[in-house]
Image: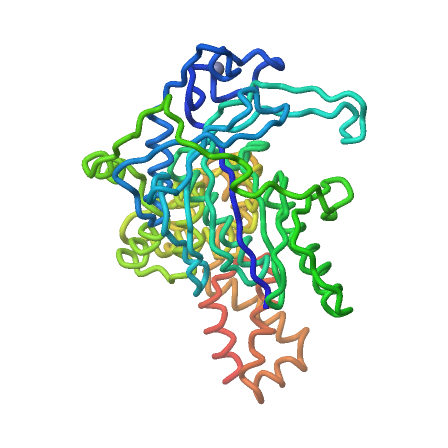
Amino acid sequence: MTKIGLEIHCQLTKLESKLFCSCKANYREFEPNHNICPVCMGLPGSLPRLNQKAVESATSIALALSCETPEKIAFFRKNYFYPDLPKNFQITQLNVYGDMSVGGEGYVSVEDKKIKIRRIQLEEDPGRIIYEGASERTKITLVDYNRAGTPLVEIVTDPDFENPRQVRVFLNILSDLLENLGVAEPGLEGAMRADGNVSIEGGNKVEIKNIGSFHDLEKALHFEITRQQSLFERDIEIAQETRHWDDRRKITVSSRSKEEDQDYRYFLENDIPWVKIDQSTRDILIKNMPESISSKKDRYIEKFDIAPQVAEIIASDKYFSKLFENSYSDSNAKDIANLITTDVIGFIDTKEKQQNSKITSQHLSDLIDAINSKTITRNSAKVALQEIMKSGKETKIILNELDLGQVSDESEIDSIISQIFEDEKQAVIDAKERPETVNFLVGKVMQKTKGKADPVKTLELIKSKLNQ
Ligand SMILES: [Zn+2]
């Protein structure tokens, strides 16, 4: 049996300033080493000042992940020497004297499984080491401290995942949740990083560090499971070790042994007082939280009688839920939801396409009105949608330009049917013997009218002609 656990590092990119100083949290727009000050550089005599908003954002994440949140939180120094760490220690959190990190004991439901969240902690990000020529073997190594001290939330799960697919579903749920909370932009380069640990068949646990994107995390997990399985099959013991994900070769490689917790010489950060988070603060945070995806989904199902799968798809995507919420009236909500999940989603299946699409909520209401009043067929709506997305012109204009008006005139449809009965004699005989084959004839009419014939009327007319 495969067991996978995760440690996810998520930058709080929506904050103005770093965790303990007033340098910008958005370090990406600066020249190297231009977003620094004595505090984040750890110069003697400087003192940290905790960013209140960072504590609130991290607590919101903990609450949204159904975590227990303690009355008081504290910070610790994690001591180690590395060039990207100007103070020679990282200010982080540790649960030694009871629970003192922003959250613990939460969970996320992934399909039928509960993935337990062991701990959520708030800490500072180190700077960045840049190997010239992008190789660790280079003789020249540069360091950029712009990122040092930016707020980071670490989310640690139990090893509850059984395969990389569950990991992917979990990460999608988590990214949506963070984005929905308005605390992070998971799409930004380096904003979400992860470590994974993998063990198979009750063997030793291997940690994989340094994975820069969720896409690579999945690849790294697949690679690591296959590597361990091949060792297991040959009766070779799997060493307990830390491995790095080599982004360029797309493999995991063994790295120097990792420090144990006691090597970090954790101790309380006495420059930052303990922070009390009382019930009223938590109540305010909960009140200000945007509606969660699951409650949005439940609302769609209850209020509009929308199928659970359809409600889930719309609720979990910000773009589609906005499009839906702005276009429905109580009477057409179900139709709009179905139009989004059957047709719109097929054309707009990436974030980039969402950004470029010119479709508005008005277009969707207009299309549903046109379908329901039998002005156009469902098929024609699909054709119109493609054009709307590109040009953004008014629905009525596009339906005219593309000549998509539905053919409902009985004599017109009837004459087309007569022609098809002439051309498809065998199909007519078949349909008389086996009524379920009648769709072939309906399809022919649709082909001839480019999908514009009223499908209900067409079927009626064909059936009555077959019985003549
Ligand atoms: Zn600073």
Please state the horizontal and vertical placement of residue 296, each as a whole percent of the image.
33, 50
Residues 337 and 371: in front is 337
Residues 369 and 173: in front is 173
Please state the horizontal and vertical placement of residue 340, each as a whole percent of the image.
45, 51
Is 330 placed above or below 127 here? below
Q: Is residue 78 left or right of residue 82?
A: left
Q: Can residue 374 be seen at all in this image of the molecule?
A: no
Please state the horizontal and vertical placement of residue 355, each as a whole percent of the image.
53, 34
Q: Tell me where residue 95 sits by quadrant.
A: top left
Q: Is residue 120 left or right of residue 431?
A: left
Instruction: Count how many numbered circles sit on residues in the image.
Output: 0
Identify which residue is drawn at 67% across, 80% down: 425
Identify which residue is drawn at 43% across, 24% down: 19
Identify which residue is drawn at 47% across, 17% down: 24
Q: Can residue 60 be seen at all in this image of the molecule?
A: yes
Is 374 placed above or below 435 here? above
The N terminus, quarter of image: bottom right
Q: Residue furthest left?
A: 280
In this picture the colour scheme is rainbow
